[in-house]
Amino acid sequence: MAPLEPWQKVLVDAEEFPLTVHGYLPCTDCHSGTQSSDKEIAHEGLVARPSDGAPNACSECHVDVASSYENSLHSTLRGYWTVLETRSVPENHAAIEQVIGNHCARCHTTCGDCHVSQPASVGGGFFDGHLFLRTPPMTRSCTACHGSRVGNEYLGLNEGYPGDVHFRQGRMSCMDCHKNHELHGDPALCTQCHINPEAAAMAPADHRYDGLQSPSCESCHADVTLGTSDNDMHSVHGADLACQVCHSITYTSCDGCHVAISEKTGNPYFQTEATYLTFQIGLNPERSYTRPYRYVTLRHVPATADGFSFYGENLLPNFNSLPTWVYTTPHNIQLRTPQAESCNSCHGNAALFLTPDKVDPVEVPANRPVIVPAVPSSIP
């Protein structure tokens, strides 16, 4: 995504914005500062990002959404801590907090990053003259952050591989599957499925595969769940295979990420050793009632035991507590894929499965829960 010119980032549409709901509010209601025709006076005490923090300017009017959003993964980045707390120890948390503050917190997203401006992590700037958009624009909001993997896969930007069928043929945007209640962190209620006197809300999610699988492929493709599909393989494999095992194609993996602070600029940066295309089927490390699959697609993440060495020695002493090949749901779904051409395109095809020989020997202990011990046999 090309960066905006400085004037484009701050120019307010003086004709359209005053006619909107937010345009009837004085600027100072959200941005503080002082109402004045003098620029210097007007900008004293200005809050440039009024949707940062909690409570914030948005919570003044949007109480219900703002209160739930505080617990959303976009806001808390809890997934980072879930992983790092497992791999680290309490005495290292001060250093880990510094790492997250310098290198991860920029991915924290506020209301404004979705509804009025491009995310701060990609340079910011208004979508359209400070007009508030109910539905965030996919390529300037969603894939601006989730671009290197999800965006490239979904839009077909990995050279030689088509975009997701939902985009190519359905012209679906992210919001068609990821609804506002999910993005706002609205808690899922057990009573949505299990009708009983109790109506306690579930705890905030620890990671993106926590809790109910929503959205799920079966939400739209109900014939697969009901057994009325005209594809016999849907009945044969049932819940043994995640849908992506048969309907995904090659996607991106990365190796060896290290973070540091630049001596020249003082800015935080990261470097990865390699980025490459791959496709690996492995055992499901997140097996649950809503994700019962035995086999799922796995993506290699660039986590490494010494990745934070700039901030201290051995900050991740329990690194092997979690796999580096992780459960993934690639956004490059196709109706027909090479592994689904025939039974033996998958059965007996060792190239598709994460076996010990495909794992860095140093990482084998961490990945034992997902490594496939024996490739499914060929069908006679």
Image: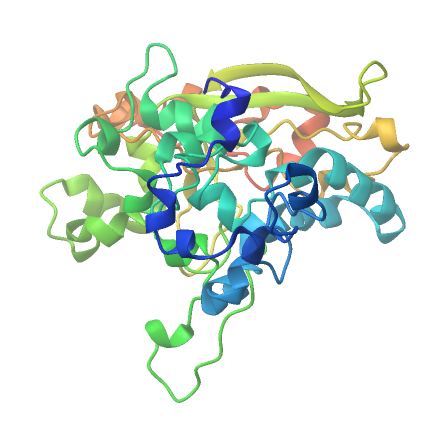
In this orientation, which residue lies closer to the viewer: 140 or 197?
A: 140
The reply to whether residue 380 is in sight is no
Q: From this view, report whether residue 296 is shown above or below residue 254.
A: below
Seen as rendered, the residue at the extreme top is 160
Question: Which residue is depicted at the point 65% across and 47% down?
Answer: 47
In this orientation, which residue lies closer to the viewer: 114 or 367?
A: 114
Q: From this view, report whether residue 88 is shown above or below residue 159.
A: below
In this orientation, which residue lies closer to the viewer: 117 or 358?
A: 117
Q: Is residue 213 left or right of residue 163?
A: right
- The part of the image, by quadrant, that contains residue 245 is top left
How many labels, in total? 0
**Which quadrant, please, contains the C terminus?**
top left
Question: Which residue is depicted at the point 41% across and 56% down?
Answer: 24
Instruction: From the top left corner, tell me how far across and down residue 320 is, in percent.
Output: 72, 38
Instruction: From the top left corner, tell me how far across and down residue 275 is, in percent.
Output: 56, 16
Q: From this view, report whether residue 77 is shown above or below residue 341.
A: below
In this orientation, which residue lies closer to the viewer: 134 or 138?
A: 134
Question: Which residue is depicted at the point 20% across and 48% down?
Answer: 235
Q: Is residue 128 left or right of residue 369?
A: left
Q: Is residue 363 left or right of residue 163?
A: right
Instruction: From the top left corner, tell me how far across and down residue 372 is, in percent.
Output: 50, 34
Seen as rendered, the residue at the extreme front is 37
Question: Which residue is depicted at the point 38% across and 44% down?
Answer: 17
Q: How is the image coloured?
A: rainbow
Q: From this view, report whether residue 63 is shown above or below residue 350.
A: below
Instruction: From the top left corner, tell me how far across and down residue 15 is, in percent.
Output: 34, 39
The reply to whether residue 289 is in sight is yes
**Which quadrant, please, contains the N terminus?**
top left
